[in-house]
Image: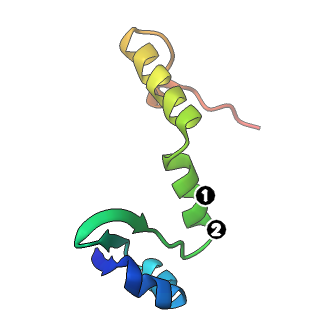
Amino acid sequence: MREVAIAEVEHKLAEFLRLAKDEDIILTQQGKPVGVLVGFADENDWFEYQLEHSEPFLERIAESRAALRQGRGVRLEEAELEEE
């Protein structure tokens, strides 16, 4: 991760967006972190970012894990795959 002052990013945004494809850029103001510039190399990176930050998706995962701990549901390893 790289740290960069917001004032510097304001003048070179396109350059930092290119750099953010390879590493997150920590934005600082008066030397303190205030944000993160995250770049995406392609649409798959964007899709994964959306999933990782989707509250409804994360809630469903938590509910499913809780159901498995309570003995409800079937683990993927135990499921029989249907052949077409």
- Left or right for 34, reference 80: left
Q: Secondary structure at mark 1?
A: helix
Give the residue at mark 1.
47
Q: Residue at x 45, y 14 (%)?
A: 67
Quadrant of the image containing the N terminus? bottom left
Query: How many C-alpha atoms fall within 10 Å of the one at disc 2: few (<14), some, or many (≥20)?
Result: few
Residue at 38% from the left image edge and 71% from the top image edge: 24
Q: Quadrant of residue 84?
A: top right
Q: Looking at numbered disc 1 in the image, what kind of residue is underneath it?
A: Phe
Of residues 21 and 73, the one nearer the viewer is 21
Q: Amino acid at mark 2?
A: Glu
Q: Is residue 60 above or below residue 17?
A: above
Read off the residue under disc 2: 43
| Quarter of the view holding residue 56 | top right
Callout 2 touching callout 1 (CB < 8 Å):
yes
User: Residue drawn 55% across and 65% down?
Assistant: 45
In this figure, what is the number of numbered marks? Answer: 2
Q: Is residue 61 shown left or right of residue 81?
A: left
Instruction: Determine the residue located farthest toward the right in the rendered image.
Output: 84
Q: Quadrant of residue 65?
A: top left
x, y percent for residue 58: 49, 35
Taking depth in this image into account, of 68 and 60 the one nearest to the observer is: 60
| Residue at 54% over, 56% down | 48
Element carrying mark 2: helix
Q: Position of residue 15 (x, y in %)?
A: 49, 91
Give the answer, above or below, for where 3 lies relative to 65. Answer: below
